[in-house]
Image: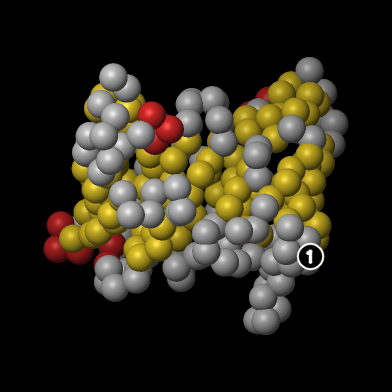
Amino acid sequence: EVQLVESGGVVVQPGGSLRLSCAASGFTFDDYAMHWVRQVPGKGLEWVSLISWDGGVTYYADSVKGRFTISRDNSKNSLYLQMNSLRTEDTALYYCAAPAAGLLGPLDYWGQGTLVTVSS
Amino acid sequence: DIVMTQSPLSLPVTPGEPASISCRSSQSLLHSDGHNYLDWYLQKPGQSPQLLIYLVSNRASGVPDRFSGSGSGTDFTLKISRVEAEDVGVYYCMQGLQIPPTFGQGTRLEIK
């Protein structure tokens, strides 16, 4: 069974930093691109970032470019999101998700999310 | 960025009745490979989103056949032939043609 388990969400002050993790199991992690998608509580879905299977290709939403860094460690079946210079508008539930094929394939697998709150 | 626009935003439906959700994109989602890169997701209350339909009309594994998708280019539709109580939640369309992937605002389906 495919499982994606996010962790690392906490309350952090504006301007602070945080690293989210996503532990993957039940599939061959290094065969898959991975995404981060976020959702402000009660609002819609916003794509944040993606990384290719080998980490060689990354993309970011304009809203996080230059502040967030996506990475992965295939030896640990783990995905990360380093979040710097956090803003109140970054407050959201952050999901990791995986497409079954390709970089932009439909997101077949989702984690349960980890909540990041940016507040003073 | 491609803008995705859904309608209606709220959809009250009587159980057993059909339901339809529209999704329009600001640019054609038709790729040169012949596929339209449009997917549908359902987020049930308190849950993560789940893939419902991919490439316009292909049901994801385990999705009941009362769900169907259609459309091409910039106009797409998700239909539920007979709504059941378990179908409540927020439905999102998403384009996967170009980066950044973008979602519609969501359509909240509720049972009357």
**Residue B83 position in % (x across, y down):** 76, 33
Label 1 resides on the chain identified as B
| Residue at image coords 39%, 49% | A64
Front position in the image: A70 or A5: A70
Front position in the image: A61 or A49: A61
Among the 4 quarters of the image, the one containing residue A14:
top left
| Residue at image coords 78%, 61% | B74
Can the viewer see residue B88 in this picture? yes
Q: Residue furthest left?
A: A75
Q: Quadrant of the N terminus of chain B?
A: bottom right
The residue indicated by pointer 1 is: B72
Query: In screen coordinates, is A58 left or right of A77?
Result: right
**Residue B93 position in % (x across, y down):** 65, 49
Q: Bin the neighbour count of mark 1 within 10 Å (Cα to Cα): few under 14, some 14-19, many 20 and up.
A: some
Q: Residue furthest bottom?
A: B32
Report the amino acid beneath label 1: Ser
